[in-house]
Amino acid sequence: MAHDGSVLAHGYREIRQFYPQPGWVEHDAEDIWQAVRGALSDVLSAAPDCTPVAIGIANQRETCLFWDRRTGRPLHHAIVWQCRRSSAICDELRAQGLAPEITRKTGLRLDAYFSGTKALWLTRDDPTLAPRIRSNDIAFGTIDTWLAYRLSGNAAHVTDTTNACRTLAFDIHRLDWDDGLLELFGLKRHVMAEVGRSSAVCGTTRDASPLPDGLPIAALVGDQQAALFGQACFSAGLTKATYGTGCFILMHTGARPVASSHGLLTTLAATPDGSTAYALEGSIFAAGAAVQWCSENLGLALDSKGAAGLAAGVPDSNGVVFIPAFTGLGSPHWAPDARAAIFGMTRGTTAAHLTRAALESMAFQAQDVLDVMSSESGSPIPELRVDGGAAANDMLMQLQADLTGVPVSRPRSVETTALGAAFLAGLATGFWQDETEIASLRHEERRFQPSANAGAAHRNYARWQASVQGLLNTHIEPFDRSAYS
């Protein structure tokens, strides 16, 4: 990225996902490492006259793994944030009455979404891990920590507050690991990363081709907090929504943590100077994943742009409501056992109607969160700043503006997660000076104003709410394959 905020080059690599059982999601951490190296090689090749001054890392915050300290090799596949394998552990701990204490300390819900229960599942599944944790010859961390370790030649075992606060083992009020919670999840302080600022030099590259040795690793930040920073949401009330595989909405709440009683999370925001700032977060597990499901599982074989074009080919969803609870419902419902459902189909329902209903579900789920967020924070949302791949869809953004009743602001670059990591790294190394300069680099590409005929949007949203309530009131027993064996 150049000093004026323009992107000079970018690299991209897909990684494999593994689904060994229903509800389980894994990545090969070595795939991630090689993908990062390949993307970096593309960037350096595309901008041969540019000299990198720092590197920033943004990552999916709850994905985690153990690795060998000496070799840096992962001990298993990384357990992805979407994975539900530790749901039974959550039920067990909830039955012990531990959920309120966990929420009070961490701002999170006791849920399989977060890293702590995944770590406990791993230690129970592999009996060799517990003695290795005690002997301190292995390390644990989220993907920011794993990449910093590899980039630094296995020297830096570090993380930042925005990632640490997603483990279920970090006290967001004391800003430190909680020994009791670590013990609860089978962890020890000595296997955990050193927690630092989101914007600070925490190591340098070594033996990390194609990068030169000695390049500062100057930012570690969770992806959603990176997007909040990249959108220049630096003060209380400013709100962003990222439409990707999931949809994640964060409202900056300033120096005060806002506790939620209606399904939101209290989390830490990234700051360049190490000051403490908080955010309210709504986590939606399946947003763009719903459109992807239509493309792949309906045999359409469309990319995201093609799927959006198919959806735009019909004036509405023809009464179809698509609730993409593939791995349960996140904020504000937190119904981990809910499963995806489609309501309102007729013989006239087409693939275009289903795809449009999947697209509309992104805005409806976001509105569920935004209504609660505004109420619990006591702050009206002046505008909604949007990013992520699906934010490029004009139809979706207009629908969101009609539902929220406030302007939706789309920047020129919707890849604000990467921008946020770059800004934080640049601030740590003096490439940029302060937040005022960063804010001047955000350029709006289009502003969507609520339309005068938003009534249809609200009627369809009411149908959505009724359908979600119907789904939540329906208990379905798990599928029994033995009946067919």
Image: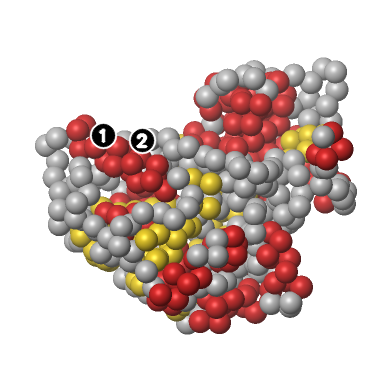
The three-letter code of the residue at mark 1 reads Asp
The CA distance from mark 2 to mark 1 is 8 Å
| Residue 302, x across and y down, in percent | 56, 21
The three-letter code of the residue at mark 2 reads Tyr
Residue 469 in sight from this viewpoint = no
| Residue 485, x across and y down, in percent | 82, 34
The answer to which quarter of the image holds residue 204 is bottom left
Q: Residue at x 60, y 37 (%)?
A: 289
Furthest residue in direction left, as rendered? 49
Q: Is residue 93 left or right of residue 283?
A: right
- Residue tagged by mark 2? 12
Query: Do the CB atoms of the residues marked 2 and 1 lie less than 8 Å apart?
Result: yes
The answer to which quarter of the image holds residue 87 is bottom right
* Mark drawn on residue 42: 1
Q: Nearer the viewer, residue 258 or 89?
A: 89
Q: Residue at x 74, y 41 (%)?
A: 340
